[in-house]
Amino acid sequence: MGNYRFILSGGGTGGHIYPAIAIANELKKRHPNAEFLFVGAKDRMEMEKVPQAGYKIEGLWISGLQRKLTLKNLMFPFKLISSLIKAGKIVTKFKPHAVVGTGGFASGPLLKVASGRGIPCVLQEQNSYAGITNKLLKDKVAKICVAYDGMEAFFPLAKIVKTGNPVRSDLVQLADNSNEALGFFGLDIHKATLLVLGGSLGARRINQLVEQKMDYFNSLGIQVIWQCGKLYYEEYKKYNSSTIKVLDYLNRMDHAYTASDIIISRAGASSVSELCIVGKPVLFIPSPNVAEDHQTKNAIALVKEDAALMVKEKDLDNDFENVFADLFKSKSKQEALATNIRKLALPNATKDIVDEIEKLLSK
């Protein structure tokens, strides 16, 4: 039967949206005649990113709870009721054969309604510390695809399948030609290269760090590919030079990874999964401003395996230069981190998640 109908729901951040799109693309490859519908939160980035990827999307009037008493929190019960009613209408009209939730508050009402009607539902949890929506849905779904060990702390063990997180297909087989990649950025093939990633919007504290440490990197003979993010590009583009390449966005991540010798990055789930596949020495600077501090927990999971280093934002002034210098000056440390992070890679994640969905369809 090729005429399956799938609903995918998740959003709020790229970490929830891009895995959902990757899963839809793999399902489409296997079932070219299938129909797809995404469900997200109105006025969040999925309403733009999903249509760009070629899929239809419906928006729910829903948002997360704030940590302090705000007008938004007082509106939450009304938004929840409105979203449950609309989710019911969407499920009735679309009649999905399976529903996939990738986290974010929009997936809550939809999966609650769908699972209540006996439609097979799969959750995909990207982080080492489960998100609140997925924790609330754990008893309602058939399978939960995870990226880390120890997730039975949050979910029923019998439902857990360790698949990893979907990553871009162009990263699974990186080219070895670092000269070509360095040439793409106009960099010197004889110098060590640091890649700095702050996510598509950018990371203020990481950008401040790079600005402060330019002379330091220069003294070590390091050149820098600095993805500062769209929000900060106007502020930092003045630093563009022969040894510092300032970019708002990296259209060729494969070249950026191939060119780099050391990477500084946030520790969002998608980034961590990509970096495991890339297999380069990484220094994580997790964002402290995310729900449940999950980036720190993601980073710690790798640090425990001697697969990465971590410096918390609050410790950057005191610790950064020491930690970075130890890594930069020790080729054996770099090789050990690269070897160990590669062992954690799960490059077939998207296929494995879709295999789990297909098992439910065959039932």
Image: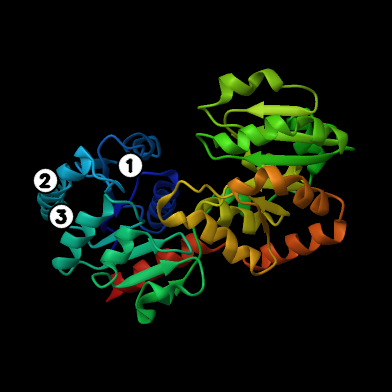
Mark yes or no: residue 345 visible: no
Q: Which mark is residue 2?
A: none
Calculate the distance from the C-alpha at mark 2 to the C-alpha at mark 3: 20 Å
Badge 3 is on which residue? 91
Graded by Cα atoms within 10 Å as few (under 14), some (14 to 19) or many (20 or more), the crowding at tag 1 reads some
Mark yes or no: residue 11 visible: yes
As drawn, 336 above or below 92: below
Instruction: Choose mark 3 or mark 1, whichever is in front.
Output: 3
As drawn, 87 above or below 55: below
Tell me the SS state at disc 3: helix
Q: Quadrant of the N terminus?
A: bottom left
User: Which residue in the rendered view is the most extreme toward the right?
Assistant: 190
Q: Are marks 2 and 3 in contact (CB under 8 Å)?
A: no
As drawn, 172 above or below 82: below
In the picture, residue 158 is in which quadrant?
bottom left
Callout 2, which amino acid?
Phe
Q: Earlier in the sequence, mark 2 or mark 3?
A: 2
Q: Are marks 1 and 2 in contact (CB under 8 Å)?
A: no
Callout 1, which amino acid?
Tyr
Q: Quadrant of the C terminus?
A: bottom left
Image x and y of residue 349, in percent: 50, 63
Badge 1 is on which residue? 55
Image x and y of residue 329, in percent: 87, 51
Graded by Cα atoms within 10 Å as few (under 14), some (14 to 19) or many (20 or more), the crowding at tag 3 reads some
User: Which residue in the rendered view is the most extreme toward the bottom?
Assistant: 158
User: Which residue in the rendered view is the most extreme toward the front?
Assistant: 318
Side (left or right) of 264 relative to 73: right
Callout 3, which amino acid?
Val
Image x and y of residue 100, in percent: 31, 59
Q: Which mark is residue 78?
A: 2
Graded by Cα atoms within 10 Å as few (under 14), some (14 to 19) or many (20 or more), the crowding at tag 2 reads few
